[in-house]
């Protein structure tokens, strides 16, 4: 067993990555790389793989708080512990644990030992008893095996022993960048930022595309979308957002097509543009924040009519979620307050009181034939698109 001073380090656990077989090393390497990106600018010791975990050694305890704040947002991490090297001599170990717990405020506790290294001569039950007895007698604290106020974890693996009393939860999932690129149609509303985040947890690098109706509307949606993209960049470290003007296309639709079909036609044009940007960015799918039946454009018939123009897969991670679930996740992400600020949504520009809810594809095709120079309109919108790069930490 290794013997070291009880310096502080972080023991990082992943869950889903551990289920991978032959390509597990790829996901571990991506996770480690993302941790390094997240901790940019913060000094720390080293990070290395160790028996299905990542060990991150701190160069100084003064950096513990900022490191923890950034680690909680690294996708792929299930949880991590603030831990200390323990002495392999259980008599020394019990004093190390006693000294740490003596500085903490709690009324009940338990010791929970996991011994995956079966070469260690003391069983888990015995470690629990020896260490627990020292804390119980020395600090006069109650042992509670059911629902203790404090749990001290002791792990013995790969000829190492450590103990920890503080655990922080992560988001789990897969490391960003391990599943390729997708393009997300990012509005300024509540749903699409949540959809984007959920695709990040599946390992996708998300490229944002925001459509606006300036100069027919003010630029509030652009400012909101940039702020939302900035908040989401916390989880993927670098983002690209394309700001696409839709006003010219909308004007052509308003002049030439039935009012009830406007939203569907707007959306079809947005899909066409987003797909062209996706191909340029070498992205493999489009992402939307659609939830079935939530608004008029999100009925099965309308979703089918809109999706018809896309050759790339269209991913809808919120499709079975209700609004309350989506709002709850938006609050957790910190995007909700930005999403509810007033903005001029391009999809609500001159929308009729009774929009079509059960679109017929042949009617949509007939309406689009009435729009002159569609390809030219699409090309012009792409030429006038602005692209911004956002970095975290900047």
Image: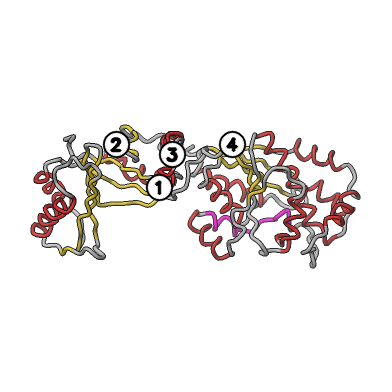
Residue 246 image position (x, y, % from top left): 76, 47
Kindly identify which residue carries mark 4: 389
The residue at which mark 2 appears reads as 57
Structural distance between the alpha carbons of marks 1 and 4: 31 Å
C-alpha span from label 4 to label 2: 32 Å
Circle nearer the N terminus (3, 4): 3
Residue 34 visible in image: no
Q: Residue furthest bottom?
A: 354
N-terminal of the pair, mark 4 or mark 2, is: 2
Q: Earlier in the sequence, mark 1 or mark 2?
A: 1
Badge 4 element: strand
Q: Is residue 342 left or right of residue 234?
A: right
Q: Secondary structure at mark 3?
A: loop
According to the image, label 3 marks what residue? 21
Q: Could you tell me how far apart the alpha carbons at marks 2 and 3 are, in whole angstroms?
A: 27 Å
Q: Which residue is mark 1?
A: 15
Residue drawn at the location 11% of the way across and 47% of the way down: 95
């Amino acid at each position: 067993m290794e013997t070291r001073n009880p310096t502080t380090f972080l023991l990082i656990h992943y869950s889903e990555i551990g289920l991978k077989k032959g390509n597990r090393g790829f996901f571990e390497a991506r996770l480690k790389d993302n941790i390094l990106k997240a901790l940019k600018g913060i000094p720390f010791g080293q990070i290395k793989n160790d028996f299905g975990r990542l060990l991150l050694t701190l160069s100084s305890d003064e950096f513990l708080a900022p490191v923890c704040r950034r680690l909680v947002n690294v996708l792929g991490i299930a949880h991590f512990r603030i831990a200390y090297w323990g002495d392999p001599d259980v008599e020394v170990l019990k004093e190390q644990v006693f000294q740490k717990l003596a500085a903490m405020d709690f009324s009940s506790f338990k010791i929970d030992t996991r011994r995956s290294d079966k070469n260690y001569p003391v069983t888990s039950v015995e470690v629990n008893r020896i260490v627990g007895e020292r804390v119980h007698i020395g600090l006069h604290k109650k042992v509670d095996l059911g629902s203790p106020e404090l749990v001290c974890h002791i792990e013995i693996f790969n000829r190492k022993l450590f103990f920890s009393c503080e655990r922080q939860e992560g988001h789990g999932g897969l490391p960003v960048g391990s599943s390729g690129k997708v393009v997300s149609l990012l509005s300024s509303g509540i749903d699409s930022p949540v959809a984007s985040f959920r695709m990040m947890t599946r390992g996708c690098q998300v490229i944002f595309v925001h459509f606006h109706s300036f100069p027919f509307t003010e630029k509030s949606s652009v400012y909101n979308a940039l702020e939302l993209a900035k908040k989401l960049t916390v989880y993927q470290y670098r983002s690209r957002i394309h700001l696409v003007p839709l006003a010219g296309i909308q004007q052509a639709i308003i002049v030439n097509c039935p009012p009830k079909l406007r939203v569907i036609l707007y959306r079809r044009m947005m899909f066409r543009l987003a797909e062209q940007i996706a191909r340029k960015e070498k992205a493999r799918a489009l992402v939307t924040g659609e939830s079935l039946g939530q608004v008029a454009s999100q009925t099965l018939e309308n979703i089918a009519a809109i999706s018809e123009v896309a050759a790339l897969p269209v991913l809808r991670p919120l499709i079975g979620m209700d609004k309350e679930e989506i709002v709850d996740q938006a609050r957790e992400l910190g995007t909700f307050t930005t999403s509810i600020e007033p903005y001029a949504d391009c999809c609500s520009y001159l929308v009729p009181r009774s929009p079509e809810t059960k679109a017929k594809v042949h009617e949509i095709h007939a309406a689009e034939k009435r729009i002159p120079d569609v390809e030219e309109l699409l090309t012009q919108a792409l030429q006038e698109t602005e692209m911004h790069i956002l970095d975290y930490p900047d």
